[in-house]
Each structure stands twice: as C-alpha cells, then as structure tokens.
Image (tube, helix red, strand yellow):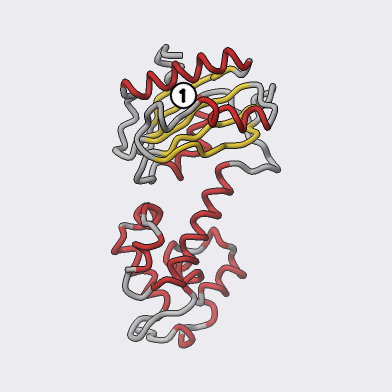
Amino acid sequence: MDYRRLKDLPEELLPRERLYQTGPEALSNREVLAILLRTGIKGENVLTLAERVLIEVGGLAGLGKLTVHELAQLHGLGKAKAAEVKAALELGRRSVSVDPMSRPVVNSPQDVAHIVMEEMRFLDREHFRVVSLSTKNHVLGISPISIGSLNSSLVHPRECFKEAIRRNSNAIILLHNHPSGDPTPSKEDIDVTRRLADGGKILGIEVLDHVIIGDNRFISLKERGII
C-alpha cells in the first residue's frame, strides 16, 4: 500500500517511533533524514521525500558534499530544511573530529586518518588543519587554518602554531585533504611542510607529520621521509 501521508503509516513504522523503540542505529538513512525534514510536500510524504533526495544527491556521501545553498535548491527542501540538514551534518562532523571527553590518542598516521577520514574525504575544497597533541599524544584540538589550494601565503606559521601555543601543545600534526581523492603530495605540499617543520623547531613544538587525506586513503609525509 502506498501511504501518501505519514500519519497513515502504522505507528511501528514511523521513523521517530522506530528510533525510540529500536535505537538510531536500526534506522535506515532515509528514516534518519526524514526525522530531520519532519514534513513532506504535496504528493510526497516525508519518507518518500527523504528517499528521493538521497537518490538525487548520491546518498549520504553526496549529501555531505553539498553546500547549504545547494541543499536549498533541491525540490522539497527550501532554506529552512536545508539549514537543519546542514547543521545536523556539521554536528556529526564535530562529534567525530574531537570528543573532548575521550581525547583520542594518536600514535600513527592511521590514527589521525581514522579521526577525520569520514568528514574530510568528502570536502570539495582543500582544508588545512593542525592537530595539537599533549606530551602523551592525546588530541587537544583540531584547528582550521585555511580553505583553498595549499600555498605559503595561506598557511602562515603564525596561524599554524597559535592554537598549539595556546593549548600548551607538545607537538602538532599537519593535516589537509585533496578533493581529487588522490593524496599524493604536491611540490607545494612538501615545501609548506618543510617550512612549518623548521618553524616548529624554533618554537620547540615538533611537527610530527603531515597527513594528506584522499578518498578513503591517505599519505603520511613522515612515512615518505619528507619530515
């Protein structure tokens, strides 16, 4: 049966009821999105709307790549729903970046990649960030430095080390993504890395690594012998 109105669905099939009864992990992607959207449009209940949106954008990966303005242009969303969806995505991003209650430990490039991969692999521009570490390699914070193609003018040592100094960090890890999906370092990546590593020696804050994130893969410049 095609339920045009969500209220015509049996109660046990309603997304919110299922979340309370079975937990959020049991919900499908369209059910989670439907809870955020709350209401459908003429001819589509909210579940149908959520399913169509996911198909149009290419699933959750595609949803994460869209700006709030692009979301607002999707039929059935508009500015209000787009803002709510984008805010929810941002909350998810922040929760996996750094949980101040758990303070993840970084002992390898794999540890860094695990923290940021699911968010940074979908970014459509290069984002340069600095991971501040304690003496025991606990993550103290991940600071955004610049957005755009990596070059020396965008990535200034002053900005890179400012938060590390404020957090009394023992060391930092440089971090940025390649929207192409290929994490192979460019000459500019290498030049910036060496420049910042030299700056760290002067300040007494070691640059442990520079991890470049691609599409579900990464490269460590430390492992490449560049640092």
- Lateral position of residue 75 relative to residue 153, left or right: left
Indicate the quadrant where residue 134 lies: top right
Residue topped by disc 1: 210
Indicate the quadrant where residue 208 lies: top right
**Depicted 84 relative to depicted 193: above or below:** below
Density class for disc 1 (Cα within 10 Å; few <14, some 14-19, many ≥20) is: many
Q: Nearer the viewer, residue 205 or 76?
A: 205
- Give the amino acid at mark 1: His
Q: Residue at x 61, y 22 (%)?
A: 171
How far across and down, in percent of the image, does residue 69 sit?
37, 63
**Depicted 9 relative to depicted 136: above or below:** below
Quadrant where the N terminus lies? bottom left
How far across and down, in percent of the image, does residue 72 sit?
37, 68
Q: Secondary structure at mark 1?
A: strand
How far across and down, in percent of the image, does residue 70 sit?
34, 62
Q: Residue at x 65, y 34 (%)?
A: 140
Q: Nearer the viewer, residue 25 or 199?
A: 199
How far across and down, in percent of the image, does residue 224 sit?
40, 15
| Number of marks | 1
Q: Residue at x 31, y 24 (%)?
A: 186
